[in-house]
C-alpha cells in the first residue's frame, strides 16, 4: 500500500508541533475526547433535522479502553464517523479542522456545540504514540476505512471492517525513556484522573472498563474467604457541571462540597457567586470568596487565576487574565463557548471576549463584597482580616489607577471603641469644622492607642483611623483625599489641634529657646527640627515627621533590602507643659554638656515610642544610670 505524504506541511512543522507547541503531554487525551464529543455532536445535530435518522441521545457515548498486552490506548465514539475523503481532508492535512469547518457552515443555526479543533488537537496524539490508527465508519455508509500514521513519514488509508458507525482512535504508545514514562497512560487510575481533570464535564458519558475485587459468595460459613476480580463498565465523567445547573437546583451544601473538592480547602467559603451570562457573549461562572488566606498567598509562589473551560473542557488551570491582582484571592471556574483559542489550546488569545468576561466578573466580585460590607459587617471584617492587604495594595499599585474602584471597600479600626468603619462612615461623623481624615500607624492597636499624638487628637474630639499594616499609609497617601477631605497622619508635624492663641504663645517660647534647640540638635543629626507643643498631656516628648515620608513609611521601606536607607524628616516635639522644660532650660544655662546628654535620652525615648530602634543603646543606658545614681 502506497504511503501518502502530508499535504501542506513538512517534517519540520510536525516536529515543531509535537515537541514545542504542547508543553504538557497529558493533554492529548483531552484533545481526542473533545474530538469524539464533536463527532457525536455532529451526528446528534443532523438527527434533529433528519427524521429518518433514529438517534437516541441516551445511546451516545465515548469509550476509553486500555490494552496492556498490545501497549495501546483506544478512544472510541459512536458519532458521525468519517468517509475516506473526510479522513484524507481532516487528518491528511495538518491544521485542517473538520469541526471548525462544520461550525462555520452552520454558524447561523442553533443547537450546535462544537468544542474541538479537529486537526491540530488530533496530532497531539503523536506526543505519546509511536503509531496512530483511526478506524472510522460514516453514519449511513456500508464502508469503513482505517487511517494509519507513524508521524512525519506520512500516512496510509485502507478499507477496513467495522460493525457500527463512529470512530476508534487507537494509540500504540511509545516505549518508556528516561525523561518520559509513556506506559503510565496504560494505567487505569491515571486515565481516570486525566478524564476527571480535563474532560469531566463533557456532555456525553465517557465510559471505561474498571476492575473491581469482590469477595466470592460462600457456600457455607466455614468456607475460606476468596476474592475474584470483575470488570465493570463505569461512567467516569460528571457530565453536567455544577455551574451550568439552575441555581434553584443547587443547595448550599452542593456549593460547599464542590469548593472543597475542587480547591482542596476544607473550611467553608465566605461567599459563592454563581453567574449565568447570556447575550452577545455567553459564559457561566462559579466563583468563591474563601474564608481565609492560603499559607502562600502573600508570597511570590502564589499563582492567581480561575479555571477556564470551553463547553466543559478544561483549557487552562489558572487563567490569570480573568481577575485583577487585587481580587487574586477569588477561586472558581469560568466556562464559555465564545472564547477564541490558539493553535495549541493551551494559551488564550488576548481578545475582546476574554476582556469582556474579566470586566464582568470584576464588577460582580466588587458588588458581592459591597453587599457583604453593607449587610454583614462581621463577615466582611473576617474577609478583610484575611485579604484586606490585597485591597490596599490594589489602591497603591499602578500609581492609584484603581483607587476609586476600591476605596469604599476599605475598613479601619477607629479610636471610637476600636470599631471598624468605612471611610464614608468616618466622613459622615466628622466634626463640622474638621478639615482632615486623621490616621495613626503602628504595629498593633494597643501600641497605636498609646501614641501621644493619638491622645492629643482624641482630646480634640477627632476620630483617628488605626493603621496596623505596612501598606496602609502608602494606600492613603496614594488616595490623597476622600470626598474632598485630605488624609493626615497624626504624627505629621503639620497636624495641629491647638487654638491659634496657644500657637502664638508657643512660637514666642520657641523663639526664646531657639539657641537651646540648636545646641540640642548638634548631637542629634537625624533631627530636622525641635519644637514645643502643648498637646501631649503627661507625655514629655514625641517624634513626628514632615514631608512625604513618614516614620512608618521609613520603617516599611527600610525593611526592603536596598543600598541606601530611607530617612523621614524628623521633628522632636517637647511638651511645653512638662517639668522637663525647666530642667532643659537650667542645663542650657549651667551645664551644656548635660543638656546634650538629656537631648540624646529624650530623642531615644521618642524613637522607642515610635517603634524605632535606639541606635546607641549602650551610651543611652550609661547616661540614664549616671543621672539615676545622683
Image (cartoon, helix red, strand yellow):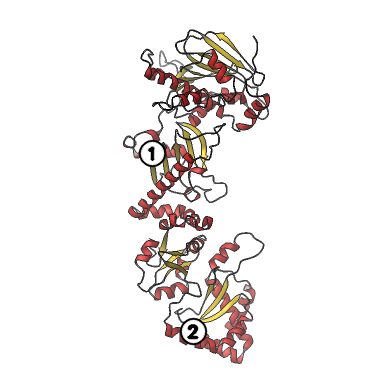
Name the side, left or right, on which 379 lies relative to 325: left
Q: Position of residue 330 (x, y in %)?
A: 45, 45
Q: Which numbered disc covers residue 32?
A: none
Q: Residue at x 42, y 15 (%)?
A: 218
Q: Would you call the spot at circle 2 few (<14 residues within 10 Å), some (14-19), or many (20 or more)?
A: many
Counting residues from the N terminus, which is met first, the one under dot 2 or under dot 1? 1
How far apart, in angstroms, are the residues tagged by discs 2 and 1? 66 Å
Nearest to the observer: residue 356 or residue 410: 356
Q: Check disc 2 and report its element: helix, strand or loop.
A: loop
The residue that disc 2 covers is 576
> In the picture shown, does residue 487 fall above or below 22?
below
* Foreground: disc 2 or disc 1: 1
Whether residue 614 is situated above or below residue 362 in the rendered picture: below
Q: Which residue is mark 1?
A: 277
Residue 120, image x, y percentages: 57, 26
Q: Is residue 289 visible?
A: no
Q: Residue at x 64, y 22 (%)?
A: 174
Q: In this rendering, is residue 267 above or below 569?
A: above
Left or right: where 590 falls relative to 103:
right
- Residue at (50, 88) in percent of width and height: 508
Please provide percent x and percent y for residue 22.
60, 31
Secondary structure beneath dot 1 equals strand
Q: Is residue 516 visible?
A: yes
Q: Residue at x 50, y 30 (%)?
A: 198
Amino acid at each position: 500500500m502506497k504511503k501518502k505524504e502530508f499535504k501542506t506541511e513538512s517534517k519540520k512543522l510536525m516536529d515543531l508541533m509535537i515537541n514545542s507547541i504542547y508543553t504538557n503531554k497529558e493533554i492529548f487525551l483531552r484533545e481526542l475526547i473533545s474530538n469524539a464529543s464533536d463527532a457525536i455532536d455532529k451526528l446528534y445535530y443532523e438527527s434533529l433535522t433528519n427524521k429518518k435518522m433514529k438517534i437516541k441521545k441516551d445511546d451516545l457515548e465515548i469509550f476509553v479502553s486500555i490494552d496492556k498486552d498490545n501497549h495501546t490506548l483506544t478512544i472510541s465514539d459512536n458519532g458521525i464517523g468519517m468517509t475516506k475523503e473526510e479522513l484524507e481532508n481532516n487528518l491528511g492535512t495538518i491544521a485542517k479542522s473538520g469541526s471548525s469547518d462544520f461550525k462555520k457552515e452552520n454558524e447561523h443555526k442553533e443547537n450546535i456545540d462544537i468544542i474541538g479543533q479537529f486537526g491540530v488537537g488530533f496530532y497531539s496524539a503523536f506526543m505519546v504514540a509511536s503509531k496512530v490508527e483511526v478506524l472510522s465508519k460514516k453514519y449511513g455508509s456500508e464502508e469503513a476505512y482505517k487511517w494509519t500514521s507513524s508521524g512525519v513519514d506520512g500516512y496510509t488509508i485502507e478499507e477496513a471492517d467495522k460493525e457500527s458507525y463512529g470512530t476508534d482512535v487507537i494509540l500504540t504508545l511509545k516505549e518508556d525513556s528516561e525523561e518520559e514514562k509513556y506506559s503510565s497512560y496504560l494505567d487505569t487510575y491515571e486515565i481516570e484522573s486525566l478524564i476527571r481533570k480535563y474532560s469531566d464535564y463533557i456532555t456525553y458519558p465517557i465510559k471505561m472498563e474498571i476492575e473491581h475485587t469482590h469477595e466470592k459468595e460462600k457456600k457455607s460459613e466455614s468456607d475460606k474467604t476468596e476474592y475474584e476480580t470483575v470488570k465493570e463498565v463505569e461512567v467516569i465523567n460528571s457530565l453536567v457541571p455544577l455551574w451550568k445547573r439552575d441555581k434553584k437546583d443547587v443547595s448550599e451544601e452542593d456549593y460547599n462540597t464542590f469548593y472543597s473538592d475542587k480547591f482542596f480547602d476544607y473550611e467553608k467559603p465566605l461567599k459563592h457567586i454563581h453567574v449565568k451570562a447570556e447575550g452577545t457573549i455567553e459564559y457561566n461562572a462559579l466563583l468563591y470568596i474563601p474564608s481565609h488566606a492560603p499559607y502562600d498567598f502573600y508570597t511570590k509562589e502564589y499563582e492567581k487565576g480561575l479555571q477556564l473551560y470551553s463547553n466543559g473542557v478544561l483549557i487552562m488551570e489558572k487563567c490569570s487574565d480573568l481577575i485583577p491582582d487585587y481580587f487574586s484571592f477569588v477561586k472558581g471556574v469560568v466556562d464559555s463557548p465564545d472564547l477564541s483559542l490558539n493553535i495549541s489550546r493551551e494559551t488564550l488569545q488576548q481578545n475582546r471576549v476574554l476582556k469582556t468576561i474579566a470586566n464582568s466578573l470584576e464588577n460582580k466580585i466588587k458588588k458581592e463584597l459591597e453587599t457583604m460590607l453593607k449587610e454583614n459587617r462581621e463577615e466582611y471584617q473576617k474577609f478583610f482580616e484575611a485579604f484586606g492587604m490585597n485591597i490596599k495594595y490594589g489602591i497603591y499599585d499602578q500609581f492609584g489607577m484603581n483607587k476609586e474602584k476600591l476605596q469604599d471597600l476599605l475598613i479601619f479600626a477607629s479610636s471610637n471603641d476600636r470599631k471598624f468603619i468605612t471611610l464614608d462612615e468616618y466622613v459622615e461623623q466628622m466634626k463640622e469644622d474638621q478639615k482632615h481624615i486623621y490616621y495613626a500607624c503602628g504595629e498593633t492597636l494597643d501600641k497605636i492607642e498609646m501614641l501621644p499624638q493619638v491622645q492629643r487628637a482624641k482630646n480634640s474630639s477627632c476620630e483617628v483611623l488605626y493603621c496596623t499594616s505596612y501598606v496602609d499609609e502608602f494606600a492613603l497617601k496614594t488616595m490623597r483625599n476622600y470626598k474632598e477631605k485630605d488624609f493626615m497622619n497624626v504624627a505629621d508635624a503639620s497636624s495641629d489641634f491647638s487654638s491659634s492663641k496657644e500657637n502664638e504663645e508657643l512660637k514666642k517660647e520657641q523663639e526664646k529657646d531657639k539657641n537651646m534647640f540648636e545646641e540640642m540638635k548638634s548631637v542629634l543629626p537625624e533631627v530636622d527640627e525641635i519644637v514645643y507643643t502643648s498637646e501631649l498631656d503627661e507625655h514629655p516628648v514625641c517624634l513626628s515627621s514632615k514631608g512625604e515620608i513618614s516614620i512608618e513609611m521609613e520603617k516599611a521601606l527600610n525593611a526592603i533590602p536596598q543600598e541606601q536607607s530611607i530617612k523621614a524628616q524628623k521633628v522632636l516635639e517637647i511638651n511645653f507643659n512638662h517639668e522637663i522644660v525647666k530642667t532643659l532650660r537650667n542645663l542650657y544655662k549651667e551645664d551644656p554638656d548635660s543638656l546634650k546628654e538629656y537631648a540624646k535620652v529624650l530623642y531615644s525615648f521618642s524613637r522607642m515610642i515610635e517603634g524605632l530602634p535606639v541606635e546607641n543603646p549602650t551610651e543611652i543606658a550609661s547616661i540614664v544610670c549616671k543621672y539615676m545614681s545622683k
